């Protein structure tokens, strides 16, 4: 059981790329301090996406406030900026290099939303469950060791005969070589 039923942390910043990484580290350290290590990856991803949206879209400035609030069994992460335009989740093209900011937030969170910010700007937020169904803190994910794969030597190719049957009628081609001189 969480001994302190309410915990709160606030960080004010300019949503610039160098500051976003710093806030991600602050969020991670705060969650470790609260013994919520199992939430670090999802919270860091969510806050990164929300701050990136502020950096890319917020007007008239990039000033914002990140707030972490732990109430009993729920962590709420919110970002308040000065732009009153509420975000809209759009479906990004498969090959697009951007436009997925809210989709990952929705994927990693229990719930998310946006609301006008009480006179100025808006608040975009997401929640993560801080306790499991049994009332215990979620376990830190178990990281299983990955079997080490021996790297292939130059010109060796690993082929699955079911997926990529080898055509024995065709001669094997020589490995590609660089055509750049010097």
Image (cartoon, grey):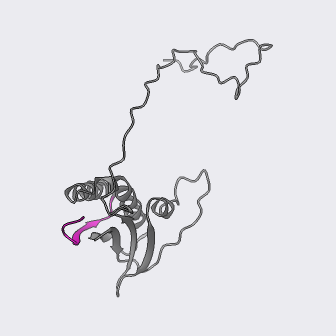
| Residue 14 is one of the magenta-drawn residues | yes
Q: Is residue 158 left or right of residue 9?
A: right
Q: Is residue 48 left or right of residue 156?
A: left
Quadrant for residue 131, please give it. Answer: bottom left
Q: Nearer the viewer, residue 33 or 82?
A: 33
Determine the residue positioned at 35% across, 84% down.
120
| Residue 126 is one of the magenta-drawn residues | no
Q: Is residue 170 left or right of residue 80?
A: right
Relative to residue 155, is residue 70 depicted above or below? below
Give, as a single range, the part of the protein colored magenta. 1-16
Count of numbered tags: 0
Relative to residue 23, is residue 148 depicted above or below? above
Quick check: can you spot residue 125? yes
Q: Nearer the viewer, residue 79 or 3?
A: 3
Quick check: can you spot residue 62? no
In the image as oriented, which residue stretches furthest toward the front? 134
In the image as oriented, which residue stretches furthest toward the right? 169
Q: Nearer the viewer, residue 11 or 129?
A: 129
Task: List x then y, in percent, for residue 16.
Answer: 32, 60
Quadrant for residue 179, please give it. Answer: top right
Relative to residue 121, is residue 36 depicted above or below? above
Task: List x then y, in percent, for residue 100.
Answer: 52, 59
Q: Where is the N terminus found, in terms of image quarters?
A: bottom left
Determine the residue positioned at 32% across, 64% down.
135
Task: List x then y, in percent, for residue 82.
Answer: 35, 77
Determine the residue positioned at 36% across, 82% down.
117
Determine the residue positioned at 57% across, 66% down.
90
């Amino acid at each position: 059981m969480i001994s302190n039923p309410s915990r709160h942390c606030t960080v004010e910043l300019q949503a610039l790329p160098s500051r976003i990484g710093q806030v991600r580290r602050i969020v991670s350290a705060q969650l470790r301090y609260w013994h919520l290590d199992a939430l670090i990856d999802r919270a860091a991803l969510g806050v990164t996406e929300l701050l990136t949206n502020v950096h890319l879209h917020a007007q008239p400035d990039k000033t914002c406030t990140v707030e972490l609030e732990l109430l009993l069994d729920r962590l709420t992460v919110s970002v308040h900026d000065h732009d009153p335009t509420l975000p809209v989740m759009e479906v990004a093209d498969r090959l697009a290099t951007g436009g997925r900011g809210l989709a990952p937030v929705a994927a990693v969170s229990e719930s998310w939303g946006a609301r006008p910010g009480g006179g100025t700007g808006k608040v975009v937020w997401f929640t993560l469950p801080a306790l499991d169904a049994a009332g215990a803190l979620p376990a830190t994910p178990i990281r299983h060791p990955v079997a080490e794969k021996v790297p292939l030597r130059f010109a060796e190719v690993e082929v699955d005969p079911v997926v990529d049957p080898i055509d024995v009628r065709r001669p094997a081609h020589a490995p590609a070589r660089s055509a750049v001189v010097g």
